[in-house]
Image: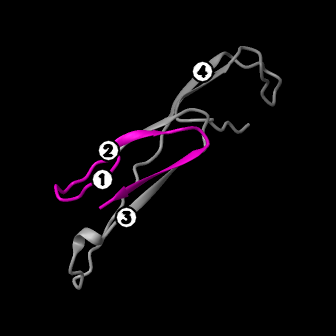
Amino acid sequence: MTITPDTLGEVRIDLLAGSARDGAGNESQAASLSVEAVVQETEVEVTVDSGTTDPTTISASVELRNPGATDISFRTVSDVDWLLVTPESGSCPPLARSSSPSR
């Protein structure tokens, strides 16, 4: 059996007593499993060439894709104070794409 979550968050699987049998014909006991479906962080690296005379003209973007059934919230973080990232946070609707440019 393969279980694929529709979206991020908790995935709970409950097996009722007697709903399955092993190779010897013994009925299953009741069991539960809960896991969290998450997405790994995406890191964007912008490299400025030494020949660049105006670094304010450099930009990059990240595209977020949501194949799930519910909104996915996001936030952006910069580890330098001179980098502007917009939007700082938001959400990506189900079955949509959202991009985040930085400059």
- The residue that label 1 is drawn on is 85
State which mark lies toward you, 4 or 1.
1
Residue visible at 70% across and 39% down in the picture: 2
Label disc, if present, on residue 60 of the rendered structure: 3
Q: Position of residue 30 (x, y in %)?
A: 66, 15
**Who comes first in sequence, dot 1 or dot 3?**
3
- Is residue 50 left or right of 31 when viewed as pictured? left
Q: Give the range drawn in magenta.
A: 76-103
**Residue 48, image quadrant:** bottom left
Q: Is the residue 48 above or below the residue 86 in the image?
A: below
Q: Is the residue 28 above or below the residue 3 in the image?
A: above
Residue 83 vs residue 80, the one in the foreground? 83
Q: Three-letter amino acid code at disc 2?
A: Glu
Identify the secondary structure beneath mark 2: loop
Q: Three-letter amino acid code at disc 3?
A: Ala
**Residue 45, image quadrant:** bottom left
- The residue that label 2 is drawn on is 88
**Who comes first in sequence, dot 4 or dot 2?**
4
Q: Three-letter amino acid code at disc 4?
A: Ser
